Amino acid sequence: MTATEFEYDGIKSSVFGLYICRFDGIEQGAVPIGSEITVNTVKSPGGNTFIRTGSVYETPLTFTFQVVKYDNNGESQQIEARELAKIMQWLVRSDCNHYLRFEQSGWDNVFYNCSLKVQKYVIAGQICGLEIEATCDAPWGYSELKHYHFTLGSNEQNPFYLYNYSDENGGLFPDLVKIRVLNDCDLSIKNTFLIKNDKNNKKVITTTIKNCKNGEEIIFDKHRNIKSSNPHAEYGLANDFNFQFLQLFCDFYNAKNTITANKSCEISIDYRAIRKGVC
């Protein structure tokens, strides 16, 4: 089933009477879905094989869709100039990206963090619809925001298991991590991930903040910023932090992250999993 309306920055297109359509009548076909990888290789000396030296995503996900204005009877209407000005204020932003999603039954809620470009369709001097081009911040979209709150015991007791069901192998930085320290301590939080679910092949990230105080609140974000309610006055937070930010990992075989701490603390984690091939 095709999508009928969209939402941008939390506002639904139906507020403006806009619904998704196709002016050219085409509903299916081959379209790019992003995730285009460039593989760098070198030719092996004296041979005919090529050695892979690395790879990188070269382009963000981009796509276009079209909308038309309908009235309550399902009849198309022209978009008035004043309406268009308000629609442009909503969709075309110079400040930052916002999340776009389509309402479509049978699909996950997928969010694209993107900026939009809008062009109008004009027939006989009347605006009959719009074409919208989205440019995302990555080669993929994201899941709905997931929220977890849990308490960890000291000496790595009572681990919390968090599953990163992303469609991209590797690590992601959560949108937001909040830590509440429950003792005066040097706090270490560890995430252990079994690569390919092999207990003999582990990836371990340990986040350490020294000189924490009881009740202190520490906050990380996905841009790797950190702040604390405790000034860490003697040497400053930068000297008490090891700059190992918590990451959540996954690969084709495993999504389980085991989170432990050396001292008791409360943790809240907000993150969006990566979604591919969903445009």
Image: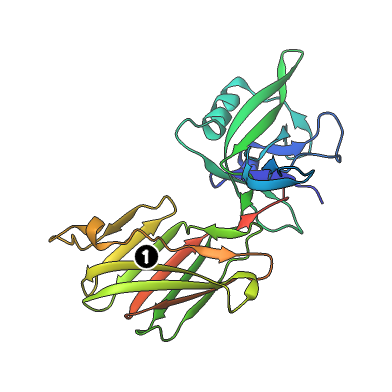
Residue 107 in the image: x percent, y percent?
Answer: 73, 57
Seen at 77% across and 46% down, the residue is 49
Please state if 219 lies on the left or on the right of 129 as rendered. Answer: left
Q: Is residue 159 above or below residue 39?
A: below
Q: Is residue 121 above or below residue 19?
A: above
Mark 1 neighbour density, 10 Å: few (under 14) some (14–19) many (20 or more): some
Amino acid type at circle 1 is Lys
- Residue 145 sits in which quadrant? bottom right
- Residue 200 sits in which quadrant? bottom right
- Residue 125 sits in which quadrant? top right
Color theme of the render: rainbow
Secondary structure of the residue carrying tag 1 is strand
Residue 213 in the image: x percent, y percent?
Answer: 20, 72
Comparing 36 with 97, the one in front is 36
Seen at 78% across and 36% down, the residue is 21
Comparing 56 with 13, the one in front is 56
Seen at 70% across and 47% down, the residue is 51
